Image (cartoon, coloured by chain):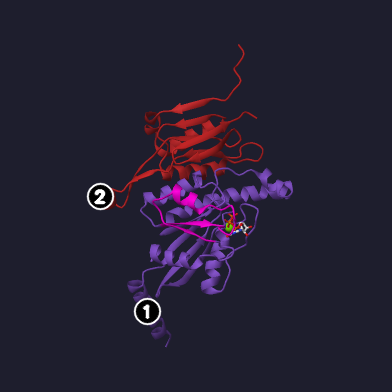
Chain colours: A red, B purple
């Protein structure tokens, strides 16, 4: 059988990620992206998880092998309700996020409610 | 004699701790090349006479975070003491080829890339030890980037104050309005860190947000 040429894109449901502890979640994303896949996360990551993902990505960068990730999400929305204020920890509503290897995924244009990206297999 | 002196010193330290709350720690964040160090240098020079770090048109010039303690800023008749941390530019990708395009040789470029990755890690780690953030954006560039979204999200999640700086407004192609429209829920001040344009408004905002 002849394998179809192309780039695999996985649409990851909220449930799939919700089952994972944060460490495993970040590991999963990074492994998938390093293997060349583009991930679309239905509900994205919390700001803390995004920061951890950036940190982990930096440890994986290798010249001529892995240059890092392209990640695009919308500004998160904070629920600054009374409960949130009371506990000094706001509930952040996370949003759709696209993550891919930096050499395959390029953001063309992004604004508050639209992300245009280009995927290329070079 | 020595005993009395050390007693006095301890005593005054005790009162300092009791009454003077420690300086607010403010991190200067943003993507590479936004002008963070240029701004940090200006702040530190304006209020202490020193400088903070080196500036370059090549990205990832700052690869170690630098802290300057006790910078006292006067504004509107009040004063506020801050610890200022100039951080390495945040990025999700670092490709050494970009440094080679700027004329560095391969070994140099690879070393710079390696140090830059460590710098990003350091900047991310600092996020947890801050009382507020100045997020510097290059007003000639698209503000909707993951780095900006992540920094803002982390400050919001912790209910910490954030001041957005739209930098490089001396350039004709700059558009601070685009930045304001992108993040309307946060205060923004448009400046030129290089030329000092609007810097007094910036200090007023600092006193207001972090005071
Ligand atoms: N025109 C203009 N250029 C500026 C301004 N501020 C900084 N620059 C220039 O932008 C470039 C980057 O400045 P830096 O202060 O090194 O930027 P940085 O954010 O510290 O960069 P990294 O440390 O690499 O993350 C330099 O060439 C500066 O001279 C400004 O207000 N206007
Ligand atoms: Mg710098």
Circle 1 crowding by C-alpha within 10 Å: few under 14, some 14–19, many from 20: few
Q: Residue at x 68, y 43 (%)?
A: B97
Where in the figure is residue A31, as x and y percent of width and height? 52, 33
The correct choice, above or below, for B7 with respect to B156 in the image is below
Side of B16 where A27 appears, left or right: right
Looking at the rendered structure, the secondary structure element under dot 1 is helix
Circle 2 crowding by C-alpha within 10 Å: few under 14, some 14–19, many from 20: few
**Camera-nearest label, 2 or 1:** 2
Q: Residue at x 38, y 31 (%)?
A: A14
Where in the figure is residue A106, as x and y percent of width and height? 57, 36
Q: Are marks 2 and 1 in contact (CB under 8 Å)?
A: no
The residue carrying mark 2 is A82
Q: Report the label total.
A: 2
Side of A75 where A69 appears, left or right: right
Which subunit holds the residue at mark 2?
A: A
Range shown magenta: B162-191
Q: Quadrant of the C terminus of chain B?
A: bottom left
Side of B147 where B54 appears, left or right: right
Which subunit holds the residue at mark 1?
A: B
Report if residue B199 lies within the magenta region: no
Of B78 and B70, the residue lying toward us: B78
Of B70 and B77, the residue lying toward us: B77
Looking at the rendered structure, the secondary structure element under dot 2 is helix
Instruction: Point out the quarter of the image occupied by ligand 1.
Output: bottom right
Q: Quadrant of the N terminus of chain B?
A: bottom left
Of B207 and B122, the residue lying toward us: B207
The residue carrying mark 1 is B12
Q: CA distance from mark 2 to mark 1?
A: 40 Å
Where in the figure is residue B56, as x and y percent of width and height? 64, 58
């Amino acid at each position: 059988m002849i394998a179809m040429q192309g780039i695999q894109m996985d649409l990851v449901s909220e449930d799939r990620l919700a089952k994972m502890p944060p460490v495993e979640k970040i590991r999963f994303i990074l492994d998938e992206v390093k293997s060349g896949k583009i991930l679309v996360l239905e509900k994205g990551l919390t700001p803390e998880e995004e920061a951890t993902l950036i940190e982990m990505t930096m440890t994986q960068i290798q010249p001529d092998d892995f240059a890092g990730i392209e990640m695009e999400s919308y500004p998160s929305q904070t629920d600054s309700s009374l409960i949130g204020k009371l506990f000094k920890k706001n509930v952040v509503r996370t949003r759709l996020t696209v993550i891919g290897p930096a050499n395959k995924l390029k953001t063309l244009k992004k604004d508050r409610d639209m992300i245009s990206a280009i995927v290329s297999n070079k | 004699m020595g005993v009395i002196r050390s007693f006095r010193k301890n005593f005054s330290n005790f009162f300092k701790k009791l009454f003077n709350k420690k300086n607010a720690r403010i991190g200067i964040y943003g993507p590479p090349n936004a002008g963070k160090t240029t701004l940090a240098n200006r702040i530190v020079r304006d209020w202490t006479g020193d400088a903070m770090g080196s500036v370059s048109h090549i990205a990832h010039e700052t690869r170690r975070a630098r802290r300057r303690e006790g910078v006292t800023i006067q504004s509107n008749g009040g004063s506020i003491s801050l610890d200022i941390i100039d951080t390495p530019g945040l990025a999700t990708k670092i490709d050494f080829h970009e440094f080679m395009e700027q004329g560095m040789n391969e070994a140099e470029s690879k070393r710079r890339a390696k140090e830059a990755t460590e710098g990003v890690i350091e900047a991310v780690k600092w996020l947890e030890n801050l009382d507020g953030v100045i997020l510097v954006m290059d007003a000639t560039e698209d503000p909707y980037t993951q780095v900006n979204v992540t920094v803002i999200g982390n400050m919001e999640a912790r209910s910490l104050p954030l001041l957005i700086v739209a930098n490089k407004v001396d350039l004709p192609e700059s558009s601070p309005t685009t930045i304001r429209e992108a993040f309307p829920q946060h205060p923004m001040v448009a400046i030129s860190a290089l030329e000092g344009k609007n810097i007094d408004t910036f200090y007023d905002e600092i006193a207001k947000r972090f005071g």
